[in-house]
Amino acid sequence: MIVSRTDSQLRWLSLLMFMLIALLSILPTLKLVMEALNKVDTGLNSPLVAMMTHPKTWTALSNTFYTSGIGTLIALVLGASFAFLVTLTNIRGRSIWVFLFMLPMMIPPQVTALSWIQLFGPASPILNTLGIAPPLGSPNPVYSAEGIAILLGIQSAPLVFLALRTQLLCLPIDLIEAARISSASQVRLWIDIIVPLTRSALVAGGALAFVSSIGNFGIPAMLGIPINYVVLPTLIYQQMAGFGPDTLSNVASLSMLISVLVLVGMLLQQWIQQRSQFALIGHSASSISFKLGIWRAITEALLFTILVLILVIPCIALIISSFVPALGVPLTADTFTINAYVEMLSRQGATLRAFSNSLTLAFSASIVLMFLCLPLGYLLTRAPLRTRVLLTSLIEVPYAMPGIVLSIAFILLFARPIPVLNISIYGTLFILFLAYLSCFLSVCLKPVYSAMSQLDKALEEAAQISGAGVFRRLIDIVLPLTAPAFFAGALLVFLISVNELTVSALLWSAGNETLGVLIFNLDESGDSVLASAISVLVVLLVVMIMACLSLLAPRLPKGIIPWHD
Amino acid sequence: MTMKSLITTGLLTLTIPMSASAAETLVLYTSQPNKDAQMTVDAFEKQNPNIDVEWVRDGTTKLMAKLRAELNSGVTKPDVLLIADSVTMESMVDGDYLYPYLSDYRNQYDASLYHKKGYYYGTKLITSGIVRNTRAAERPTDWSDFAKPEYMNQIAMPSPLYSGAALIHLATLTDNPNLGWTFYSELHANKAMAQGGNGGVLKAVSSGSKSYGVIVDFLAIREARKGSPIEFVFPKSGVSMVTEPVAIMKESKHKDAAKKFVDFLLSQKGQQLVLDQGYLPARSDMPVPAGFPSRDKIKLMPFDAAKTLKNNEANKARFSEIFEG
């Protein structure tokens, strides 16, 4: 890593960071490339060539592109409009809106998918009440490429929202005031000031949404497989079903393809962000507030409708299905039962163990990543362009890789005891911890990096001239000005990893089950009611954690908690 | 140096809790549902207090992916496998990963249920039959009903690309002269939906998004007994089956404990456990679980594991062609 104007502390820091990226991103990626190139010398018969020339691969690739692309657009529209409306207008009850908007990420995607299927299906409690339920066995509009895209969009909208909101809080109010005094119209205000200043965050959020949609398995598996609509992650899963000698190489080849997709996305992001650099100087004293006038009630009604669709309905479906004796039994006073909860909470500790494992992992991963991203984001902003693109792409790859593939890379790396140290981390919680770090590094880094690249360099240079070392500058200047982004990043990591499934699915072992694994296992073995009960508990837990954060909000710097101003 | 101290604390919190030390630890990889796996392990540990069983549960496909990655790195984690189907076991035999063990209990089993050299033993019968929503208009009695126009758009089935049981179901039915591949083409023409696994079929039929389905017996019968609006039908011409075989890994360091585990599953006690969990025991002198018809009413279709393994890839490809072409 080349850093302009190094001091010795900085050089030392760069080296440490590079080793870390090597461990978390380069190693697993390399392992997979090697696996994909297996038998490549056999030319046309090699697994790589066979996979790349298979028409199904290309169908899956274009499907992935289609669903993720549309999903990203939906996420951008949803996330951005929520962020603009809630941050920049005089809407009532801001914090509640934001709080609720963060929640859809908390519900596991397969649960969201299931609740939508039920919502439009013949057994839909809501449609039945209204008397407009379709007849038994009628086809369901949710099973379609567009259905997948909509759910992907909903799932990743909070990513866009959080990335953008941090930026909006830093909008320089004096610019807006100046424009208003010069009697600029609202439209001009948006086109000339607000949009250019937030473009970088929009692009960062969009990139996150795109990448997370590419790697999503749960939604296309539930909605795509029944109609033979295959995307790359589900194709990989199908490849897994064979126990042939070339299976791993096939899977690795497909994963490389996904990585290439991600790389293209990253380059695009870099290119756009290069062209929209504006320096901002942290929080403005007062946030901008557009008066909506009569539009306020209409806006609120619109937001409410959207939230009902993406949050309330799935939640109701989840709650209903956790209080019935068996799936498909309607919920009435006679059928109401808390058996599922009793069974899950009294059964020999698996549930509590999963809760404690998931919480431990999510807390440690988010805190460690938060502290890693401070120096890492800082170094990246100072690195030359080529290095930066290379490193950010490398960091992005593990996040985009389908979880099942990343975990295979980790098994290949760590199944045997680590040489020299002779410690075996395989089969412990620690390997999950490492995998989470690898997987979510980019989630935490994106908002941080985006905020840091907007910092005005003058502040830091002033400190440097006065003789402040690099750590001093990081802690006294960079950190306070970008704190909200850190918190947003860490919070995102926490929320995503509490429910993480696909990575954990292969890496868990006896006694180390996580919540995602528990829910998935129950669901897969047909115990959907038990799975719903656990999911309800998970959502409750997350709401409680978020509420605790709200209580802390007055003691924390402004803007740290996304749903507090 | 906050970072350093943080990482150390992180490391400390992540140390593994030491399990109670018993004389010997046996590692089991299984695809049984959580509840059943725990029950089986508890009963075995009660009988063998000096053996401690650690188990990992996942769907057969994922479990095998994990195992394959481990074996590729030259590590054998499990001592014993207890997975859904004998075809996967055959592939393990081909790869020379299993240890042949001739259990004394084998004489009490039908020869088709275990490998003649003792590489694996079937422990129960999980058959695939028909499930219908109780509100559905038709009452199917046999597979051929699914080709009728009344069933258009109404059928859910597990996909052979995902589920081991579904792949065996496909091999069994396509081998049947009265059904064959024609039947699968008819299913496709009838817009049958090939879902992921059996859990998906259960959800589709019990929530009414489809009226009928192909499903494993115990799942539908168990949910119906809980009050789910579905019923299970054993088709007249017969059902396909998987046998949930158990096998010992060749590289296992705990062969004696592993043999005890195999013997336990095949013993009267182990088979009683299978019955209590709501499955059809493999031993033919055992009764059937509640909700099942008597054994003579359940017709099993013939099936050859080694042959199926040979045709697996071709079967999958042909299925994809019909359902996606």
Image (spheres, coloured by chain):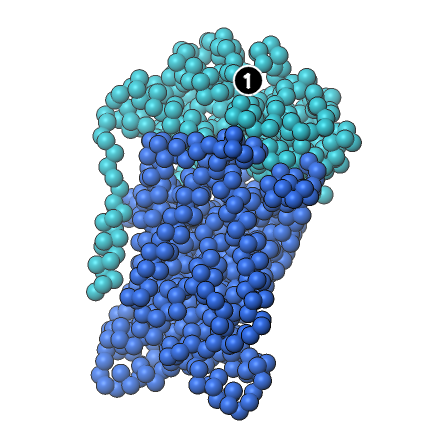
Callout 1: SS: loop
Residue at image location 57% in from the left, 11% down from the top: B295
How far across and how far down the image is residue A205, in percent? 49, 66
Looking at the image, which is closer to me, A124 or A270? A124
Label 1 Cα crowd, 10 Å radius (few <14 / some 14-19 / many 20+): some
How far across and how far down the image is residue B77, in percent? 36, 35
**A522 sits left or right of B303 in the view:** left
How far across and how far down the image is residue B217, in percent? 57, 23
Question: In which image quadrant can residue A415 be found?
Answer: top left
Q: Could you tell me which chain the residue with mark 1 belongs to?
A: B
Residue at image location 64% in from the left, 40% down from the top: A128
Looking at the image, which is closer to me, A212 or B202? B202
**A214 sits left or right of B53 in the view:** right
* Total labels drawn: 1
Q: Chain B is drawn in which colour?
A: cyan
Question: In which image quadrant can residue B15 be found?
Answer: top left
Amino acid type at circle 1 is Gly
Question: In which image quadrant can residue A375 be found?
Answer: bottom left
Residue at image location 40% in from the left, 72% down from the top: A451
Residue A447 in view: yes
- Specify the chain shown as blue: A
| Residue most extreme to the bottom | A182
Question: Which quadrant, please, contains the N terminus of chain A?
Answer: bottom left
Which residue is under mark 1? B291
How far across and how far down the image is residue B93, in percent? 48, 27
